[in-house]
Amino acid sequence: MKFLLFFSLCFGILAGRNATTDGYVYLGHNEDQGSPAMLNIYNVPANDWRCSYLWFEFPGQKAGDSFVNEYGVGITSDKCKSREDKATGTVIYEVRTTVAQKARSSREAVHIIGALVEKYGYGDSGRSYLIADRHEAWVCAVVKGKHWVAQRVPDDEIATIPNYYTIGKINLKDTVNFLGSKDIVRYAKKRGWYRPRRDGEFNFRLAYSDPATLNSKNNRDRHELAQMTFFGDAILGDETPFSRKPMRKFHRKTLSQLLTEEPIRQKTTVLTTVFTMNPNFASKNGTTIWVGLPGQDAASQSQWTIGTKSPDCCHRYATADEAMEKHFSDTGNFEEKWPNHFYWHYLHPEMDIDVVPHDFTVYVPKQPSVESERDLTARGDTYNDHFHVLDDPERGLLYAFWTQGSHEAGNDVHIVFTKSSDAGRTWAEPVMLAGSPSMADPKPVATYQQPMLSRSGRLYCLWVQETTVKKNLCGIMRGMYSDDAGQTWSEPETVPFPIRFEEDPADPSVPPLWCLWQRPLRFGSEGKFMAGCSRYDRNDIPRVEFWQYENIDEDPEVRDIRISFFNTGKEAFDAKYVKNDHEYIPKDGLSVEEACIVGLPDGRLFSVMRTSIGHPIWSVSSDDGKHWSRPEILRTKDGGTPILQPRSPCPIYDYAGPEARSGRYFLMVHDTFDFNGVISYQNRGPLFKRDGEFVPGAHQPVWFGEPEVFSPRDTGNSFYTSYTALDGEGILWYGDHKFYLFGKVMDPKD
């Protein structure tokens, strides 16, 4: 019993498409292991005898891996100990690998499992396989030897599966909803596990389960919590239902959050996955796998799709075929043999801070990374983003502003400020300038701050202020200033928007949807501050315009700040007019956003923007940002290879300083994109730096070299950054994993 309680704590959830808010089929699962674990992620290509699939591998484990294939068939499992003490069998690991390689639907997967069990016999005490595709979900219960039974989850119901069998009453004549061994009842009678006069109608769960599993407190506690979450009450014991209609439709976030709650989440939980299958798209394109490593909520973490290229740091071996060949060999001393593997940073959180090498540490959150362990009455600080650092050389100070909260777009998002008087080596305790102080005391949020320092030394901070609409991009512009280096600040005031466009909300009481993520730089006429703005239309599709702050150097009151809008309204950059090498239209729309500007030695401005079409785009301005060339896909050089990029930040900076016009630059990109993906929001895996150089007379004025790894993280590399030049050193200031705030000295290659 000790072994069962400690090692077999997996948990699964299956939801039919009519039980979910988005109409998707869900498969949620916690994988728990007591022995040393190492997670590898492989994209396995198709060949003559198998389809392609995504493989989450735990080397040495016979029943710990999860798979989803190009037909959108996903499979995981929970150990379920049976009564069987005489039968034998040989297949365990082959069950899920065969499903991954061959099954074109979840129903076909059940037939494959049944055929393997009946031919070779199952080699372990018992197990429930959780299988789903974009149309339906199944639980297939196998017993040591040659017996099995499977039940379909109704489209409007949810099934929750701890470490005991949950299939109860069966009807094998109803082949739409049940499949199984023909002698499943007869064999139970033969073994004395089922006596019709005593037991009444046959119940697989009661007949075949090891009674100890049904009476396990851990199993019952976990099952009770899951039932209370979805159904509002819990039915345990002999009458436990296989599945039920939920009290309301649920979103994947609820499944994921439940899987992070104790006692469902245990110290032995090594992987959380939430498979979402969209019935409205082709299998390969309609399946997304949300992956949470130890301590993470999968619904807010990395998204993988079938065909997602996994980075090298996720692998034990170079190819999936070699990994499969050696799955059961060389399975000891993982951390010693593969010390640079990504997984150790999640198993050992104390190592996480050193994943990305850095030279300066500005902020490390005080709240725990695990959401359930946080103090909701304290200021949320586990989300740190839009990190702007600027230099005040007259006072010898660095100022840092960023958006902070418990999580992105949370109810406690606010803006904080700190400063350093020793060139970034140490920083003062951050103070909150605007926004919502905590999850326990939510107020209208503030985000996307824009700091500027006037020539006289007045320090401004402007931001997006939530008003009537709960949306982190929708708000008025508010601001304040300080004349004493941030010791005290003026009362917040509103900056008027002088222009509304037909793309803005029809209701004049609803503010525009907009954000500026790069801090304004002195690229406008006569050295005025300028920045690129992402302006969203009524369908939430962003386009890029440019703002010039006209009078910051006159030290105006915030209410008197004037802004000019360039490249705006119908002239704003629109992705549908960008010529692409691929015919790709993502589900999330054709977007252009998040412009970053550098100056060229010839006096022009060069801007790089992220898009949803698989590439960054670029444009130039010859008149200080008032007019811009038609945007084009960013390439390595004229006629060169297009640079790949998901819908993720792609900042560019001048090595010599943000406004230096030196002609030497660096670009931050992921260098990957899957044009078969339904959406452009794809895994933000390793982040690369590409050095760029101004080429006089070239059509694309900056040409780029080969990529170098900047952040090896397998996901979460969304870098909303800034740049300063101090004493001849350029420093990139960035949020690592949107958690830590660091600075790194950037050296161009000679």
Image (cartoon, helix red, strand yellow):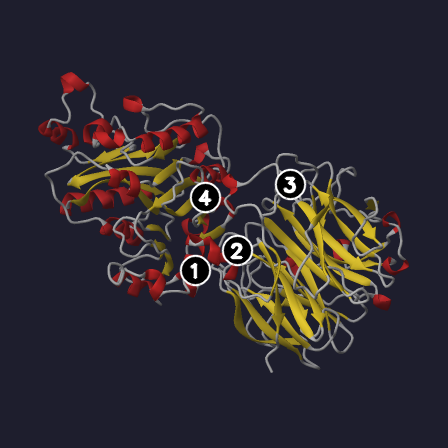
Instruction: Please provide percent x and percent y for residue 226.
Output: 41, 31
Q: Amino acid at mark 4?
A: Asn
Q: What residue is disc 3 on?
A: 412
Q: CA distance from mark 4 to mark 1?
A: 30 Å
Q: Residue at x 12, y 31 (%)?
A: 187
- Asked if disc 1 and disc 2 are in contact, CB closer than 8 Å, the reply is no
Q: CA distance from mark 2 to mark 3?
A: 21 Å
Q: Provide the secondary structure element on which disc 3 rests.
A: loop
| Nearer-N-terminus badge (2/4) | 4
Instruction: Please provide percent x and percent y for residue 410.
Output: 61, 42
**Which of these two is toward me, 308 or 237?**
237
Q: Residue at x 34, y 66 (%)?
A: 337
| Nearer-N-terminus badge (4/1) | 4
Residue 348 in view: yes
| Nearer-N-terminus badge (2/3) | 3
Badge number at residue 278: 4
Give the foreground label among 2 and 4: 2
Q: CA distance from mark 1 to mark 2?
A: 12 Å
Q: CA distance from mark 4 to mark 3?
A: 32 Å
| Nearer-N-terminus badge (1/3) | 1
Q: What residue is disc 2 on?
A: 716
Q: Amino acid at mark 3?
A: Asp
Q: What residue is disc 1 on?
A: 342
Q: Provide the secondary structure element on which disc 2 rests.
A: loop
Q: Residue at x 20, y 24 (%)?
A: 202
Q: Amino acid at mark 2?
A: Gly
In the displayed structure image, the side of residue 644 where residue 33 appears, left or right? left
